[in-house]
Amino acid sequence: MPPPAEELARLDRELAELDARRAQLLTRRAW
């Protein structure tokens, strides 16, 4: 198992990617 800090960083990165994708979808829908 990875150390908690590493796991947190990985989850944070995944969240950032999901957030960026969601922002793209929202802006595309807005236009």
Image: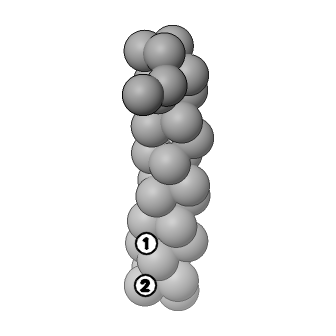
Residue flagged by tag 2: what amino acid is it?
Arg
From where the camera sits, is residue 10 visible? yes
Q: What residue appears at the point 48 percent right and 15 percent down from the top-left corner?
A: 3
Q: Are marks 2 and 1 in contact (CB under 8 Å)?
A: yes
Instruction: State which quarter of the image contains the N terminus.
Output: top left
Instruction: Give above or below for 16 relative to 3.
Output: below
Q: Which residue is mark 2?
A: 29
Instruction: Give above or below for 20 relative to 24.
Output: above
Foreground residue, 21 or 29? 21
Q: Tell me if mark 1 has few (under 14), some (14-19) or many (20+) residues whose alpha carbon lies within 10 angstroms of its own.
A: few
Residue flagged by tag 1: what amino acid is it?
Leu
Check disc 1 and report its element: helix, strand or loop. helix
Determine the image quadrant of residue 22: bottom left
From where the camera sits, is residue 23 visible? no
Instruction: Give above or below for 7 relative to 3.
Output: below
Check disc 2 and report its element: helix, strand or loop. helix
Q: What residue appears at the point 52 percent right and 83 percent down from the top-left corner?
A: 28
Judging from the image, the colouring scheme is: one colour
Q: What residue appears at the point 43 percent right and 15 percent down from the top-left corner?
A: 4
Q: Which residue is mark 1?
A: 26
Q: Tell me if mark 2 has few (under 14), some (14-19) or many (20+) residues whose alpha carbon lies within 10 angstroms of its own.
A: few
